[in-house]
Amino acid sequence: MAKDKKYDLEERLIDFAVDVVKLVENMPNKKSAAHLGGQLLRSGTSPSLNYGEAKSAESKSDFLHKMKICLKELRESLNCMKIIYRANLFKPDSGIVELQEECNELISIFVKSILTATNNKN
């Protein structure tokens, strides 16, 4: 994860996805790590891809729907990382704590964005 905060949301989501990939690739070779790693890989890379779709939304409703998918996937990613952390299925230098913090910040951004978009739609 970059040390400087990026304010371009698309770039932050891409960086988040890359960091998720790196975390998963370095998880131990255990059945539980493979299961949770696969789940995190799907949910952690999804927000970046769905945000790209949201930027090309066909309507305000379509935009909101795709933004809500991003939020749902970020929350799923955070919960998955919490399980991985508590089950100690990561390497000490994996950056999982920082990744959880970034995920929390992204969740906050999406909550506010969805609220703003909902208010602007009405």
Image (tube, rainbow, N blue to C red):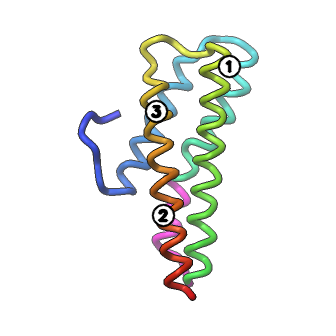
106 or 46, nearer to the observer: 106
Is 22 displayed left or right of 42 in the figure?
left
Q: Which residues are magenta?
A: 48-59
Q: Kindly identify which residue carries mark 1.
A: 33
Q: Position of residue 59 (x, y in %)?
A: 56, 84
Q: Amino acid at mark 2?
A: Lys
Which sits earlier in the primary sequence, circle 3 or circle 1?
A: 1
69, above or below 65, in the image: above
Q: Nearer the viewer, mark 3 or mark 1?
A: 3
Q: Secondary structure at mark 2?
A: helix
Q: Amino acid at mark 3?
A: Leu
Which sits earlier in the primary sequence, circle 1 or circle 2?
A: 1
Q: Quadrant of residue 58?
A: bottom right
State how far apart marks 3 and 1 are (Cα): 17 Å
Q: Nearer the viewer, mark 2 or mark 3?
A: 2
Q: Position of residue 17 (x, y in %)?
A: 48, 41
92, above or below 8, in the image: above
State how far apart marks 1 and 2 are (Cα): 33 Å
**Could you tell me which residue is drawn at 54 percent across and 85 percent down?**
121
Q: Residues within 10 Å of mark 2 (few under 14, many from 20)?
A: few
Q: Which mark is residue 87?
A: none
Q: Residues within 10 Å of mark 3 (few under 14, many from 20)?
A: many
Dots 3, 1 in contact, CB < 8 A: no
Q: Amino acid at mark 1?
A: Ala
**Could you tell me which residue is drawn at 57 percent across and 88 percent down?**
122
Q: Kindly identify which residue carries mark 3.
A: 99
Single out the residue that lies furthest toward the left. Answer: 4
Q: Position of residue 46 (x, y in %)?
A: 58, 50
Q: Which mark is residue 112?
A: 2
**Could you tell me which residue is drawn at 29 percent across and 54 percent down?**
7
Q: Nearer the viewer, mark 1 or mark 2?
A: 2
